Image (cartoon, rainbow, N blue to C red):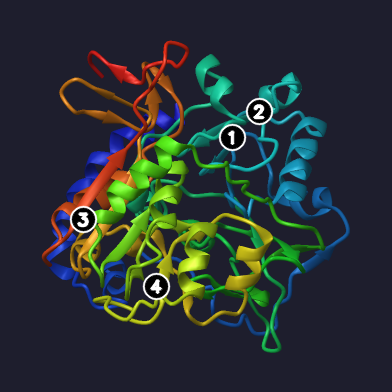
Amino acid sequence: MAATRVLRVLRHVERGLRCMSTAISSAPGSLSAALNIHEHGVERNTIRLGKSPRVCQTAEEALEPYLKSDGMVFIHAGAATPQPLMQGMINVAKAQKLRNLRTIHMHLEGPGPIPVDDPEAAQCIRPLPTFVGANLRQQVMTGDAEAIPIHLRDLPLLFRRRLVCPDVALLHVSPPDAHGFCTLGTSVDWARGAAEHAKALVALVNQQMPRVHGDGIIHFSQFDAVLHHDGPLWIHKTKELTPEEIRIGQHIAELVPDGATLQMGIGSVPDAALSQLTNHKNLGIHTEMFSDGVLPLIESGVINNSCKSTYRGRTISAFISGSQKLYDFVNDNLSVNLKDVAYTNNVEVIASQQSMIGINSCIEMDLTGQAASSTIGARIYSGFGGQVDFLTGASACAFLGGMARASWPSPRGRTKACRASFRI
């Protein structure tokens, strides 16, 4: 099976990473240079002279030439999930009775590629998520989808080492500027690697996708087909913090020195910690993702990125997910750069930061202190993500004060389930 093949070659990816380590320094851009040692894909930020994409009226029209049985489709993920294109893919797959059309992606927002109430789609499409969202957990448990366990930092290497070769990449991009350049919007992560190596690019050009600076620049002429769209992005709704979570946030905030560089995962615990940092000074952001929790700290000047070791003065991330206010904030904002996840999550780059502090949450913990963030017992809940990348890098931080924290509220009362396990 496809996932089994990917797992077999992951050890070679890790071996290659070790060989590359001496070539990687903390200077901006050096990681990309090291990756260029290996076969690199098409530079999508250049102009294809004399080329222009097909402008399509429907998603089915845009996708039909590129979908086939046993084919591979990359799908842009997170807040950039291109729902109209994904629905068009499902329609074409069912109409043509395709079989084993594989999709590879991180967590998708909204309906997934094989909805629970659409068994016909499950006969045509086989998802291979590298991070399992709520719309695919049941399908992974039943065997209708295969989860690929892999660290976030290694995802682009699946393309760059030719381990995965998509026939088409479904992307969700911002409108072209006056010179024809689009961006990957809210999610650069490994979508840049997919765009470089996919045989064809089909883009959902959304008037409401923010234009975000960084590594996600693609010229309009690089697309093979486009579908114009004007619709809101997916909104991540935050939950009200509990007293226990606020207390945890206070404990974490006490450990954060002024001038530290922060990474925060997703969840109530990182949000609680951010809410308690209002009296700190000169904090910076180098993370795989961020959400609305950083906005009050940026607006008040607590986060100004003035003490960072790399990209001083800029907030660095691989993707974002949050409210419309967040998307408006990052739009054409030079102080925010979204980078390739091979850079943001590189352990040596993380360890080079000034007082790197990793703030994450976990699902359960056993009596030896082992924490699980991607599984509940034997059930896959999400994926490796980048937590291990930042736990490792922050713990190895060369500057005094580097540390990593994974926290969760201890249960109280007889009605609350305990998340402590005898053994994980």
> Mark 1 or mark 3, which is nearer the start of the sequence?
1
* Label 1: few (<14), some (14–19) or many (≥20) C-alpha neighbours in 10 Å: some
Residue 157 falls in image quadrant: bottom left
> Mark 3 or mark 4, which is nearer the start of the sequence?
4
Closer to us: 44 or 68 = 44
Mark 3 lies on residue: 394
Measure the alpha-carbon separation of dots 2 and 4: 53 Å
> Dot 4: what SS?
loop
Where is residue 301 shown, x and y percent of the image? 43, 77
- Mark 2 or 4: in front is 4
> Mark 4 or mark 1, which is nearer the start of the sequence?
1
Measure the alpha-carbon separation of dots 3 and 2: 44 Å
Q: Looking at the image, which residue sits at the far bottom?
A: 178
Q: Quadrant of the N terminus?
A: top left
Q: Amino acid at mark 2?
A: Arg
Write the residue at 18% across / 68% down. 352
Give above or below for 100 relative to 397: above
Where is residue 179 shown, x and y percent of the image? 67, 88
Measure the alpha-carbon separation of dots 1 and 4: 51 Å
Q: Amino acid at mark 4?
A: Val
